[in-house]
Each structure stands twice: as structure tokens, then as C-alpha cells.
Image (spheres, helix red, strand yellow):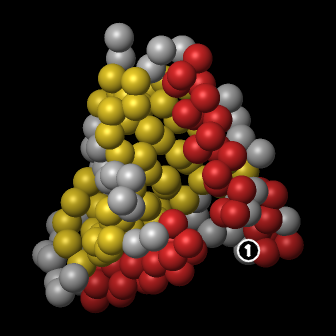
Amino acid sequence: MSSPVVLLTVSAIPVAVVRRFVKSFELSRAVPECCGLAWKAVRAQNVKAGRNVAIYWDGSIRLEAGVELQGPFSEEGEVIRSATPGGSAASTTHFGPYGGLGAAHAAIQEWCAKHNQRLTGPQWEIYGHWQEAWNNDPSQIRTDVFYQVNMP
């Protein structure tokens, strides 16, 4: 289930990520794998970190997945520094299992078409901090979904 779509101005968030080129059917494996590698590198440097993030830079699924940075980080192996896009974004919050995220993406795309907002670049997801209660009630899992737009 998704919240209403809203138009926001967002700031870029620094992230430690692993970059991959994947097919859509590989996302459920690639995103957690990349986030795990990023967390390993961040923890090794004792860097304070935030939520998991996946950035989809283009339709060929040039993926960057990892973790928000809240401190200095030195690139390590395939874990590199990047940032979420900044600027105008259409956004919604999805509550429920990750398998339902397609509905949140579709809601943003439909809202943008209806409100003359042109999708101009990447989309990204920021995953809520995992809570034990979600194991028993996955309908509470929170994912914020963003699409970069060009405001008229």
C-alpha cells in the first residue's frame, strides 16, 4: 500500500554503494548483496551510516545500492562514494513487502503523467531501518520511492 504522491525538493544524500548492471529479475538478489558489501566496508571504517538505498540510474538498470553515509568514508574495493539525486522529485511511501514496490513506482509514473511532471532521470528507493515487528507484520515495512522530475 502506498501513500499519496507528493512533489518535493530533495537534497543529495551521500552514500557508499556498489555499482552493478542488472536485469529486473536480478534486483531481489542484487540489491541486498550490494547493500551487504557496502555495510561491510562502512563498518570496517567505523563510519556512522543510515538506511539502505538503491538508485536506478537508467532503464538498462544501472544500479547503485548501498547505505547512507553520516561521516567520512574512503572507497574500498568495489564500494564507492556516490549520492542520491538532488532537486525536484515525485515521491510516495510504500508500506508492505518489497514485492509490492512496483505499485508504488506505477503510482508515481501515473501521477506524473496526470500532473504534467516530466520524469527526467533516475529513480531511487530508501528502505526503512529493519524492525523486528516487520517479521510478524510485513505490511509495516517502509520504503520511500523517488523519481527525479523536471518542474514546469
Q: Is residue 41 above or below residue 124?
A: below
- Say left or right for 79 vs 59: left
Q: Picture coordinates of residue 112 (x, y %)?
A: 52, 24
- Say left or right for 3 vs 17: right
Q: Picture coordinates of residue 18 (x, y %)?
A: 30, 75
- The quarter of the image holding the C terminus is top left
Q: Is residue 41 above or below residue 132?
A: below
In the image, farthest residue toward the left:
74
Residue under the image location 29 percent in, 43 percent down: 85
**Can residue 33 be seen in the rendering of this structure?**
yes
Q: Is residue 125 above or below residue 85?
A: below
Residue at image mark 1: 132
Residue under the image location 71 percent in, 56 percent down: 100
- Say left or right for 18 vs 78: right
Q: Picture coordinates of residue 60 (x, y %)?
A: 36, 59
Secondary structure beneath dot 1 equals loop
Q: Is residue 116 above or below residue 148?
A: above
What is the crowding at mark 1: few (fewer than 14 residues within 10 Å), some, or many (at least 20)? Answer: few
Residue under the image location 85 percent in, 65 percent down: 137
In the image, farthest residue toward the top:
152
